[in-house]
Image (spheres, grey):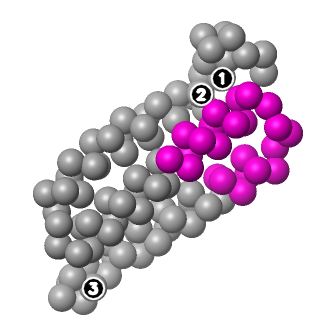
Amino acid sequence: MFREQFPTVLEALDDIAVGYHALMTALEEQESSKVTEILFLLVGSSYTEFEEVLMLALNGYGSGATKLLRALYERTVTTQYPFSSWPAWTSLVGIGG
């Protein structure tokens, strides 16, 4: 069974889920603004896609999981951009921050 063969993969997936939860908690604690709302929605939708990929993969639907994985990757890259270049992103979307 997968769980016995690859326990480290399941541990890594648990770590990812904990990371998503910590990020969502940190965003909830921020003062409400357009920026935090956009980031909250991006992170939330990324987590939903992560759960969908996980559910498909763990139930033997690797092909379906692979298809969703690309969308998850793209959303993750999109979400990382504001964190890596905050001033450029806020001017791009017209939000002071």
**Given contact means CB atoms under 8 Å apart, are the residues at marks 1 and 3 in contact?**
no
Q: Is residue 87 visible?
A: no
In the rendered image, the residue lying farthest to the left is: 63
Asked if residue 25 lies left or right of residue 82, the reply is right
Q: Nearest the camera: 14 or 56?
A: 56
**Given contact means CB atoms under 8 Å apart, are the residues at marks 1 and 2 in contact?**
yes
The amino acid sitting under disc 1 is Trp
The quadrant of the picture occupied by the N terminus is bottom left
Q: Which mark is residue 76?
A: none
> For the point 81% across and 50% down, which residue is it?
29
The amino acid sitting under disc 2 is Pro
- Where residue 79 appears, as percent x and y from the top left, is 52, 35
Q: Which mark is residue 86?
A: 1
Residue placed under numbered mark 2 in the picture: 82
Residues at marks 3 and 2, CA–CA distance in whole angstroms: 36 Å
Residues at marks 1 and 3, CA–CA distance in whole angstroms: 40 Å
> Badge 2 local density, few (<14 within 10 Å), some, or many (20+)?
some
